[in-house]
Amino acid sequence: SKEINTKWAGKTVHFAKETDSTNEWCKRMSKENAEHGTLAVAEFQSAGKGRLGRKWTAPEGSSVMMSILLKPEFEPQYASMLTLVMGLSVAQAVCELGVEVSIKWPNDVVVSHKKICGILTEMGVQDGKIREVVIGVGLNVNLKEIQDELKDKATSLYLETGKTYDRNRLIGLVMEKFEINYEKFVQTCDLSMMLDDYNMLLANKSQPVRVLDKISPYEGVALEIDKDGALLVRVQSGEIRKVCSGEVSVRGL
Ligand code: ATP
């Protein structure tokens, strides 16, 4: 495996054959004062997590499951944008392997409309300050088969390209991209320094979408994201609405 070319992101890497969830593992390490940038990588998760209590499942050994521990200085309100920062970083890393990849706002990295990566950001707050942020990444790399339940919405790099990829190289690439993007992010606490990069990879761009707002769902055309990570959607009347992640989900039509 190759050396990771970063200053702090993934400088310390812990590998395990199996863990419950790399996010939980990172939180435990945080309690033991592990430093900013510590990376946890596992071959198998017995209790892999997605958003909203969903599960992340992958067979042993063929995907990348990892979580990075961060100890940001900024206020808790900005942390959710790190999901987008990581999504961009994963997409850029995959792009560098020559695979045509895009980002389905806010948190899915997709290849030919199917999900190859999920991202879960969790934060611990104490006395109004961030204690830690953990960002988990599940990336389907060399999976030769997708479970039946996920067949129409998930895929892997192998299934899309017929090639297998060095997982450690990919981990290194993601860390390199993430470190660059994170350092841009903390300068302004928004995405202004990577907006063009993100929007270039945005899968929803110019696509009709349905915004599943619980109170009043609506349809429109997705335009781009703004510096706060919101998706701008133009509705029939011409009005442009700002869709914040976390509040609603967006589906293609
Ligand atoms: P969705 O992608 O279903 O719209 P979401 O973005 O909230 O929802 P995540 O939190 O990123 O989803 O991940 C959990 C979901 O991802 C699960 O409900 C399951 O549908 C799907 N999933 C689980 N394991 C995998 C996998 N290895 N590859 C792709 N998708 C997976």
Image (spheres, rainbow, N blue to C red):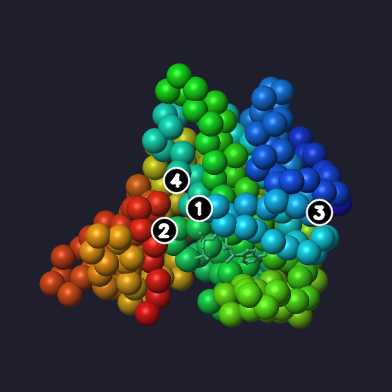
Query: Does residue 230 appear anywhere in the picture?
Result: no
Name which residue type carries label 1.
Leu
Tell me if mark 2 has few (under 14), some (14-19) or many (20+) residues whose alpha carbon lies within 10 angstroms of its own: some
Tell me which numbered mark, 4 or 1, is placed earlier along the sequence.
1
Q: Residue shown at 74%/42% (left/top)? A: 40
Q: Element at badge 3?
A: loop
Give coordinates of residue 103: x percent, y percent.
50, 65
Q: Residue 241 falls in which quadrant of the image?
A: bottom left
Name which residue type carries label 4.
Met
Q: Is 177 on the left-hand or right-hand side of 198?
A: right
Quickly name the residue at label 4: 81
Quickly name the residue at label 1: 52
Tell me which numbered mark, 2 or 4, is placed earlier along the sequence.
4
Q: Residue shown at 21%/70% (left/top)? A: 235
Q: Element at badge 1?
A: helix
Quickly name the residue at label 2: 196
Q: Which mark is residue 226?
A: none
Q: Nearer the viewer, residue 142 or 7?
A: 142
- The answer to whether residue 224 is above or below residue 144 is above
Q: Are marks 4 and 1 in contact (CB under 8 Å)?
A: no
- Real-space CA distance between mark 1 and mark 3, rounded to the nearest whole angstrom: 23 Å
- The answer to whether residue 224 is above or below residue 86 is below
Please state which of the two labelled residues, at mark 2 or mark 4, is closer to the viewer. 4
